[in-house]
Amino acid sequence: MHIWAVANQKGGVGKTTTVVSLAGLLADEGHRVLMVDLDPHGSLTSYFRFDPDSIEHSVYDLFQVQGKITQELPKKLVLETGHPNLSLLPSSTALATLERHAQAQGGMGLVISKTLAILWEDYDYVLIDSPPVLGVLMINALAACQQLIIPVQTEFLAIKGLERMVRTLTMINRARKKPVPYIIVPTLFDRRTQASNKSLRSLKDTYEDLVWHSVIPIDTKLRDASTAGIAPSALDSSARGIKAYASLISTLKDPVN
Ligand code: ADP
Ligand code: MG
């Protein structure tokens, strides 16, 4: 099982879009893929037409039982998306209450790691979507993953938010046996604008090899797919944005390229 998390403490940078795009493409290749929605807003869950306000069972159930996750529980929570090979562990808005109680209870950082250990044989790839808040949910995502993807919107001040994310990661890596490798992915890139080009240049000046060699362009097909509630590759696999995500998968599978 390969576990990739997508995180950034900034909202609207393309996290959820990255998760559905990568997950859909990996599922199209025939891999069994599980998406995990750790954002209390439940954008990923809503994307596939489940309602995070009224959903009966979600990842929240795993946090409620804490250390005592049974072998059966994770499987009971998984929903099918309708896209072949693509499953979802949904979020619910109840997750928002977790941050307040988690501090008091402690020991909640490994709930997702434990859950994925139970599902180890059932999926080839897991893509974790996380909230734009440093809290127990993001800590779970960072503790469970083997690879972190940090989408950064190519706009003015993009680097400011990234600094915070990298500091968070440094803190988490101190607590992990093996540090998480990460890749910074420039998103919503518009080559016609100075803002995009300038911020891409300053990203590369600051973070050098940690920045992916390519970019995810602005592509309305990605937005259209979210309106249709289907994985972007199912809408139009030849769209520029989808092709860029396919190229990102090649890099992640074979980091030397
Ligand atoms: P986050 O999860 O970081 O908050 P989203 O993935 O929800 O960000 O993206 C924010 C908005 O931008 C959404 O409306 C999404 O459809 C749109 N979007 C994301 N990436 C692209 C892209 N490459 N091209 C066009 N629209 C995009
Ligand atoms: Mg999101």
Image (tube, rainbow, N blue to C red):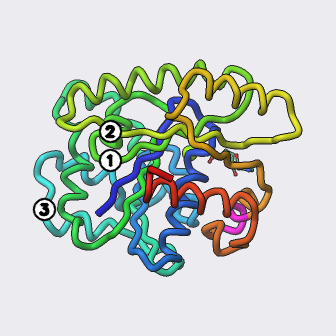
- Disc ID at residue 70: 3
Given contact means CB atoms under 8 Å apart, are the residues at marks 2 and 1 in contact?
A: yes
Residue 178 in magenta stretch: no
SS at badge 3: loop
The x, y position of residue 177, in whole percent, is 17, 36
| Among the two numbered marks 3 and 1 on one chain, the one whose residue lies closer to the N terminus | 3
Q: Nearer the viewer, residue 209 or 118?
A: 209
C-alpha span from label 3 to label 2:
27 Å
Q: Residue drawn at (46%, 26%), measured in percent from left and top?
A: 165
Q: Is residue 164 above or below residue 118?
A: above
Q: Is residue 22 above or below residue 66?
A: below
Magenta stretch bounds: 225-229
Q: Residue drawn at (45%, 79%), measured in percent from left and top?
A: 30
C-alpha span from label 2 to label 1:
7 Å
Q: Nearer the viewer, residue 165 or 215?
A: 215
Quadrant of residue 49 within the rendered picture? bottom right
CB at disc 2 and ligand 1 closer than 8 Å: no
Q: Nearer the viewer, residue 187 or 69?
A: 187
Q: Amino acid at mark 2?
A: Val
Judging by the rendered image, the residue that carries numbered circle 2 is 180
Report the side of 123 relative to 47 (left or right).
left
| Among the two numbered marks 3 and 2 on one chain, the one whose residue lies closer to the N terminus | 3
Judging by the rendered image, the residue that carries numbered circle 1 is 145
SS at badge 1: loop
**Neighbour class for label 1 at 10 Å: few (<14), some, many (≥20)?**
many
